[in-house]
């Protein structure tokens, strides 16, 4: 048996906090790394939705149940409360209608994990202030013209969004590199965030 691969930091946080034996829908699941980890370490029944055909093929090659689809279009077909968790990792900022995607996420799953890069991180701010150019960082590695990110969300934007909609934040993790940072200064200091939500 091959050793488990190392997960990206936000995915590792999610994997550690999904209950044993749960039913999970991973939306924008990429190559299925999180789903495979959940299946192998948590006995999770994981399903995936992924827009990129190459990633779908990679996930299926791992023995995972993944279909090709678009979160902006295909979530409407899933029944209410059909999963214990719906997961949207590093995908929110790429959705055309992130508010509707989140509504579906919280309808489909009893709980939802959402992770995203924080566009208010100090390096992003500094790049704009001093260089006057869109930043290229470890968390945001693409140039402005080929990035999939179309909605530049900050931690404080997301907090205000869920608060205005009465969405309950059960937990939140704020990450700088591979380490957690405090909630108080997260909008400035965290490179990305993970939220656990429910209605």
Image: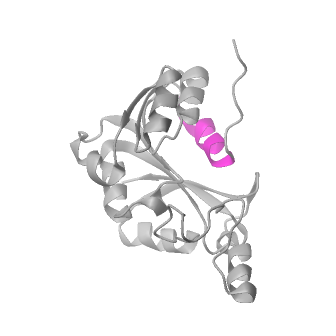
Residue 173: percent from left, percent from top: 64, 55
Is residue 98 on the magenta stretch? Answer: no
Residue 152: percent from left, percent from top: 51, 72
2 vs 67: above or below: above
In this view, the residue in front, 144 or 180, is: 144
Question: Which residue appears at 73% of the width and 85% of the height?
Answer: 131
Quadrant showing the N terminus? top right
Count every numbered label the image shows and give the total. 0
Which is the main secondary structure of the residues drawn in magenta?
Answer: helix
Residue with the most extreme front position: 145
183 vs 30: above or below: below
Quadrant showing the C terminus? bottom left
Is residue 21 in sight in this rendering? Answer: no
In this view, the residue in front, 81 or 53, is: 53
Is residue 15 on the magenta stretch? Answer: yes
107 to the left or right of 49: left
Residue 103: percent from left, percent from top: 32, 57
Question: Which residue appears at 27% of the width and 46% of the height?
Answer: 74
7 vs 141: above or below: above
Q: Which residues are magenta?
A: 9-19
Is residue 13 in sight in this rendering? Answer: yes
Residue with the most extreme top position: 1
């Amino acid at each position: 048996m091959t050793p488990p691969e190392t997960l990206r930091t936000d995915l590792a946080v999610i994997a550690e906090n999904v209950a044993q034996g749960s039913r999970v829908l991973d939306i924008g699941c990429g190559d299925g790394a999180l789903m495979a980890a959940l299946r192998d370490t948590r006995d999770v029944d994981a399903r995936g939705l992924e827009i990129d055909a190459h990633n779908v093929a990679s996930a299926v090659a791992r023995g995972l149940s993944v279909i090709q689809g678009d979160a902006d279009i295909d979530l409407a077909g899933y029944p209410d409360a059909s999963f214990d968790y719906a997961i949207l990792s590093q995908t929110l900022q790429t959705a055309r209608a992130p508010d509707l995607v989140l509504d579906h996420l919280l309808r489909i799953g009893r709980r939802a994990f959402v992770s995203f890069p924080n566009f208010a991180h100090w390096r992003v701010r500094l790049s704009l202030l001093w260089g006057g150019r869109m930043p290229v960082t470890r968390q945001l590695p693409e140039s402005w013209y080929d990035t999939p990110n179309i909605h530049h969300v900050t931690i404080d934007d997301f907090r205000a969004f869920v608060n205005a909609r009465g969405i309950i934040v059960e937990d939140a993790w704020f990450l700088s590199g591979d380490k957690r940072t405090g909630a108080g200064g997260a909008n400035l200091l965290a490179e990305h965030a993970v939220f656990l939500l429910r209605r």
